[in-house]
Image (cartoon, rainbow, N blue to C red):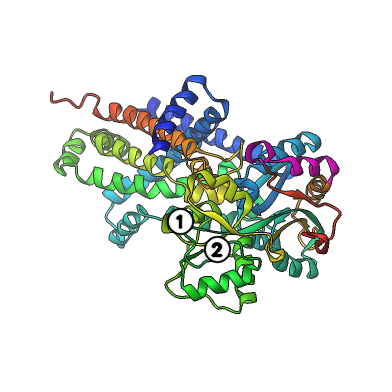
Amino acid sequence: MGALGEGLVEAIKMLVTGDPEVLEISLRTLQVSGLATLISVAIGIPVGVFLALKRFWGRELAVSLVNFGMGLPPVVVGLVTWLCLTRYGPLGFLGLLYTPTAMIIAQAIIASPIVAGFTVAAIQSLNPKMHYQILALGANRVQFVWLLLREARLGLLAAIIAGFGGVISEVGASIMVGGNVKGSTRVLTTAISLEISKGRFELATALSIILLAISFLITALLTKLQQHRRQPQ
Amino acid sequence: MRQRRLRASILVVLLTLFLGMGFAAERAAVKVTDVILATTTSTVDTGLLDVLLPIFEAQTGYKVKPIGVGSGQALAMGEKGEADVLLTHAPAAEKPLVEKGLVTNYRLVMHNDFVLVGPAEDPAGIRGMKSSAAALQKIAQAKALFISRGDDSGTHKKEQELWKKAGIKPGGAWYQESGSGMGQTLLIASEKKGYTLTDRGTYLAQKKNIALEILVEGDRDLLNIYHVMQVNPAKFSKVNAEGAQAFVEFMVAPETQKLIADYGRDKYGSPLFFADAGKSEEELGK
């Protein structure tokens, strides 16, 4: 396979010379998927905590829905978001279609259930006795949740890693609502799929290597945060 | 605890503001200068737009957002007012939009041609045939594998036209639909040693990755004609009429036409497109 070898060489060349276009696409990828992950954390963690702690009628159905949402097909999310954002669609007045914001919205929709689902599991897997312990120590509601979140840190960071991994690798929704516009909504995954259509496999491989490298770096960073102070004490 | 909460809420407020600013900036930008160009994948995949758009943007200050989709989808976007200007290659499907007044300023831009490609062994024996319809008949008779785009793109529409002309309703195990773009379809046809119909530009761009040869070319039926048109602002109030009109004028301007005529000459040895502004469709290919 010539393309793989040439792709590797090309990727190293791009990284060494700091190819401005690749740099720009990589930065945008981080920006879009990073912001989408942040939003999904802001939505997913509170929802997950609520579902894990509250007992209410229909809770199981709600958790099932979240778990179902963890596997939402990106291309379906893309289609629905696209239909909502088109000029004559319900949210067309916002004028967001084919902007990075549209991509952030679609990706946040993909990642939120993932974060929420992992959060439910993380909180529920804590020893229930801990609840009484914390309450017995006189914690108020906020302190109680805060302490639980701290205890569930391992699982919560897994939630964030999974959410980020889900969106940075996603192409169906991004190409649909972003349109793969050069200099505006082109991210690494959509650029790769374009280069494949163009028949430039070396370049596609090079971009893939860069995407994997970025994805690995971020994941490694989050893992460090996760494993930090987790060594047996 | 209280301090921590305060810090958290400040963070949330700042993040919201940051995002809000992003929204506001983009909305402002969208209103004034964006032109949404719905176009066929071949203008994107051949790299032609990468050459033309920066020049148009520098000349006019508009920002073009080229959305590369099949011609069918591009026309559907135009029909719903979801794009400002269209650059497509499916004249038979474009005409109804012109007649209904959904698009205006319908101008011929350029042409190249479709070619029938297939494996060098050529199991159906179509090499060198003059009529593409007759070649398709031979493929059907031989039940030789044919890979169709199957995606309602301009190329797919052309293929269906040709089958109709050949008097054949293709189907069965030898006729497969890839459901993907031209580049992908060529790769599939190459791997499976099948025939397919392709525009010459994408074939040339993919040539080094595939083992397919041009077997039938030069038939008048194989002309691939590109038109540019603006979505009618009288029907859709939200389109960027000025931007769309500027783009149409740009595409048929003599300087742009020269760029189109020269495009690809250095890389492929022959031009990918023939510039045709001002001609009529009937004059082409003569």
Residue A210 showing in the rendered view:
no
Give the residue furthest to the top.
Answer: A16
Q: Residue B267 magenta-drawn? A: yes
Please identify the quadrant where the C terminus of chain A is shown.
Answer: top left
Q: Is residue B32 above or below residue A90?
A: above
Relative to the observer, which residue lies in front, B21 or B42?
Answer: B42
Q: Secondary structure at mark 1?
A: helix
On residue B188, which mark appears? 1
Q: Main secondary structure of the magenta part?
A: helix
Residue type (three-letter) at the residue carrying disc 1:
Ile
Q: Mark 1 belongs to which subunit?
A: B
Which label sits in the foreground, 1 or 2? 1
Q: Residue B66 magenta-drawn? A: no
* Location of residue B74 (image quadrant): bottom right
In the shown orientation, is residue A132 left or right of residue A140?
left
Q: Which residue is mark 2?
A: B151
Image spot of residue B80 (x, y percent): 68, 63
The residue positioned 35% from the left and 52% from the top of the image is A70
Relative to the observer, which residue lies in front, A133 or B208?
Answer: B208
